[in-house]
Image (cartoon, rainbow, N blue to C red):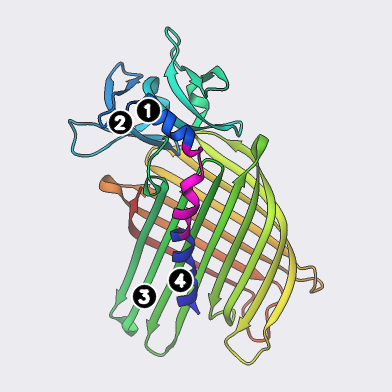
């Protein structure tokens, strides 16, 4: 069963390459904009920092408050905090997202004698904007991989006492387009110890969010859990709903969502499989403007529609510290609660892990 989830996860993100070919602008508009920049292979994007230093190179992306700049005179890309930039000049077009939910294609250049102000020209509208209000920036025409972020991390525990061997693994990925975002993760915990039953746990998720106007978004997702302690061979939950960002800027994201869910549960014993309908209400918080540290937490409540008095809760917390060379260390907590489990199963289960990983972006 976990192999099928892995296969679905991989096929989901491979299929995005086809969908993503038209996720920004029309081919006619793209040809026009490529002609305007004369298909340059060397870019002279200029970044003016708050300490009066100037960097010249190629803007690759700005996301989660960090701008990535490629230069000819450095072996590795520069990572620059967005808050440290006071001016920016470029002759290219970008996909731009503002903290009020607007998303469009535009050129970007700082306004003369106005630090912190940029002039945006989409070809339809032109206006000035505070640079701090830009939460996402990426050149038009970059390939599929430039919008894909993949994190892979592992944790290993080996002790002589009772011959304990434990492996934790996590692969997560996000693809961010102009109007939508796809994300997913697959986590496992495998533990073997003398005189104690083996522990096997898997949870995964595949989700697509479509950005609407005024910070609203539509959401489709599938969530999967296999858990020996709660006697779950596989719980599959499919959700559809809408959400709203209360805070969405270069320092943090706070949003909530709600809708309907359909859940299928198969058990490791002879208990018959169950299907149920549920409501769901979730809240998510992401804080990433604290140096190299970022925090991500989410909590979802599932009150059942078809089973009287039943409710479930899923809570996830990740704390990630970035290291050089795109490496990182991470601490994660996952908690699951069911007030009406099957006979002999635990009401709650949690996993706390520490791991070391690498990020492709």
Please identify the quarter of the rendering in which residue 356 is found: bottom left
Residue 285's x, y, as percent? 57, 46
Q: Secondary structure at mark 2?
A: strand
| Tag 1–tag 2 contact (CB < 8 Å) | no
Q: Earlier in the sequence, mark 1 or mark 3?
A: 1
Measured in 3D between alpha carbons, the distance from the residue under mark 1 to the one under mark 4, in whole angstroms, is 41 Å
Measured in 3D between alpha carbons, the distance from the residue under mark 3 to the one under mark 2, in whole angstroms, is 44 Å
Image side of residue 183 versus residue 41, left or right = right
Please identify the quarter of the rendering in which residue 154 is found: bottom left
Residue receiving disc 1: 35
Q: Earlier in the sequence, mark 3 or mark 2?
A: 2
Magenta part of the chain: 15-27
Q: Residue at x 62, y 82 (%)?
A: 266
Q: Residue at x 66, y 76 (%)?
A: 264
Please identify the quarter of the rendering in which residue 341 is found: bottom right
Say whether residue 22 is magenta. yes
Q: Which mark is residue 137?
A: none
Residue receiving disc 2: 58
Measured in 3D between alpha carbons, the distance from the residue under mark 4 to the one under mark 3, in whole angstroms, is 24 Å
Pointer 4 local density, CA inside 10 Å: few below 14, some 14–19, many at least 20: few
Residue 83's x, y, as percent? 42, 26
Residue nearest the viewer, comparing 357 with 45: 45
Say whether residue 239 is magenta. no
């Amino acid at each position: 069963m976990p192999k099928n989830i892995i296969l679905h996860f991989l096929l989901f993100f491979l299929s995005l390459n086809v969908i993503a070919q038209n996720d920004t602008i029309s081919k006619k508009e793209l040809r026009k904009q490529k002609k305007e920049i004369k298909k340059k292979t060397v870019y002279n994007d200029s970044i003016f920092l708050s300490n009066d230093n100037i960097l010249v190179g190629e803007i690759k992306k700005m996301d989660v408050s960090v701008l990535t700049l490629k230069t000819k005179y450095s072996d590795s890309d520069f990572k620059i905090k967005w808050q440290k930039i006071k001016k920016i000049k470029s002759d290219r077009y970008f996909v731009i997202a503002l903290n009020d939910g607007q998303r469009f294609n535009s050129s970007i250049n700082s306004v003369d004698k106005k630090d912190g102000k940029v002039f945006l020209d989409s070809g339809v509208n032109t206006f000035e904007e505070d640079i701090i209000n830009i939460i996402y920036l990426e050149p038009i025409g970059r390939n599929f991989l430039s919008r894909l972020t993949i994190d892979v991390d592992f944790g290993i525990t080996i002790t002589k006492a009772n011959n304990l061997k434990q492996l934790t693994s996590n692969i997560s990925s996000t693809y961010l387009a102009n109007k939508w975002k796809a994300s997913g993760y697959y986590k496992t915990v495998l533990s073997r110890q003398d005189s104690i039953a083996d522990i096997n746990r898997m949870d995964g998720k595949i989700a697509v969010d479509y950005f609407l106007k005024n910070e609203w978004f539509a959401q489709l997702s599938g969530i999967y859990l296999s858990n020996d302690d709660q006697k779950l061979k596989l719980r599959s939950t499919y959700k559809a709903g809408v959400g709203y960002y209360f805070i969405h800027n270069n320092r943090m994201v706070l949003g909530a969502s709600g809708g309907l869910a359909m859940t299928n549960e198969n058990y490791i014993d002879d208990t018959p499989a169950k299907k149920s309908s549920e409501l769901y209400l979730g809240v998510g918080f992401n804080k990433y403007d604290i140096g190299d540290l970022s925090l991500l937490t989410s909590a979802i409540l599932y009150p059942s529609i078809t089973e009287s008095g039943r409710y479930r809760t899923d809570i996830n917390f990740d704390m990630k510290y970035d290291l050089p060379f795109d490496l990182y260390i991470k601490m994660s907590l996952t908690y699951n609660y069911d007030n009406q489990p099957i006979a002999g199963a635990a009401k709650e289960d949690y996993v706390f892990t520490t791991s070391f990983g690498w990020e492709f972006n």
